[in-house]
Image (cartoon, helix red, strand yellow):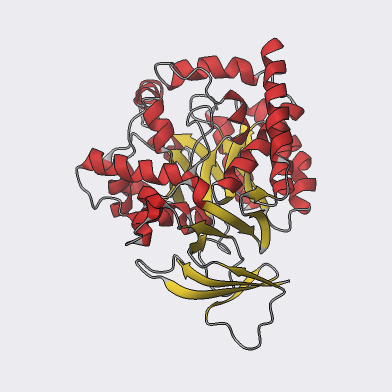
Amino acid sequence: MNTLITNALVIPMTKEGYTIQGNIGINGKEIVFVGQTPASFHPDRVIDANGSIVMPALVNAHTHLAMELMRNYKDTEPNLMAWLSQIWPIEAKLNDEDILWASRLGVCELIQSGCTLFNDMYFNEHMTARAANEGGIRASIGLTLFGDIDDTRKRLAEKPKNCAPEVEKSNGRIKLAVAPHAIYTCTEVTYRYAHDWAKEHAAVLHTHLSETKGEVDDCVKAHGQTPLDYLDGMGYFDDTKHLLAHCVHLTDSEISRLSQFDAAVATNPTSNCKLASGVAPLGKLGKAGVKLCIGTDGSSSNNNQNLFEEMHVASLVSTVSTMDITSLPPYRVLEMATKNGADALGFPQIGTIQPGKEADLIIVDIHKPHLTPLNDPFSALVYAAQASDVDTVFCQGEMVMEHRHILGLDLEETMRKTNERWEDIKRR
């Protein structure tokens, strides 16, 4: 199908400050032109985007999608480890159906906030992959690891087979990553095994790193090294691609070394604020050349999957922590939420609006009081726009939300079933 989007203010995310007033042509899943419509292009469908911004769809670079179940639950624990002590007993009760319905809800929430690619780390991964396929969006599904080498071998023998049917039917929208949870839940041998598996399968390695000061202090006490040094010393960063979640507590020397790895940092500012973990040194990381992207974390520690809100918070906490208004300007924040996240997760075919790229894009309604006057569209998207301003969402050239209506999933049923699953979990 040929789709023509007309009269749009296009933010292609190819150059700072660059916008185009014009049209976008989509043939199947591919963007074929941006700007003037060639006479040879004959659309089957025309969408008038007058009064709207069209931009690349957003990328949630770190989340635990099925934690939708624990939204607004145990919100007053004093720190990360105290909070986890309340969450882990709930997680021990979860089954496939729980994960499936919660993941469906998460997919709906992501779509409504303009996101078509998420990077997940959780249990029963094949259920989250299924939900992504049903919603028609992309996912980097982390094969999540805990514990020692025996558990790890078993998980990496079973999990890829469980996910294979969903990967095969996704038309390239779903990829598998390897996700050792953290240095305080996985042994060194597990990390080494995960590294070797990722290298063999050309998969991204996804882990939490230096999220809290307590994690860093405990690692120094146990190993005589910081978490980054500990992983580097075992060869974890050799010849592999990495997504490191949080990275709140890094030294200047660690930041310098991190810039030499094929690694991106996914910051999660709302979660870090809520759990009193601290503020990641985004200004220093950016200046050192470390690729930055952004995630929401799970909805139990955020408490939503709203990347527009996350972009806003990221910019504010970077400014106030550095006392430098230029430390993370709006265009850089939008880069984090679009092309940086796509590249970090191994999806270079999206993240910008250019001919030859796949059509993952969103139409943002700017005919709103809080976006009037627009003035600078980049500032407007980071500081003023709301997830509810996202009107229509395309993934791989297919419309997955039209005028706020999700097309692949029944939102009302999904909310009802998720509530039913949560009530049942509490009775178990």
Quarter of the image containing the N terminus? bottom right
- Work out whether residue 106 or residue 321 is closer to the camera in this orientation and state it: 106
Q: Position of residue 75 (x, y in %)?
A: 47, 20
The residue located at (70%, 11%) in the rendering is: 427
- Work out whether residue 32 or residue 51 is closer to the camera in this orientation and state it: 51
**Is residue 239 in sight in this rendering?**
no
Q: Examine the rendered structure and indicate whether residue 196 appears above or below residue 101.
A: below
Quarter of the image containing the C terminus? top right
The residue located at (50%, 17%) in the rendering is: 74
Indicate the quadrant where residue 103 lies: top right
The residue located at (55%, 27%) in the rendering is: 186
Q: Position of residue 205 (x, y in %)?
A: 55, 44
Q: Residue furthest top?
A: 427
**Is residue 14 in sight in this rendering?**
yes
Q: How many marks?
A: 0
Q: Position of residue 375 (x, y in %)?
A: 32, 62
Q: Position of residue 336 (x, y in %)?
A: 43, 52
Residue 127 in the figure: left or right of residue 191: right
Residue 181 in the figure: left or right of residue 141: left
Q: Examine the rendered structure and indicate whether residue 247 appears above or below residue 421.
A: below
Q: Residue furthest bottom?
A: 39
The residue located at (67%, 26%) in the rendering is: 151
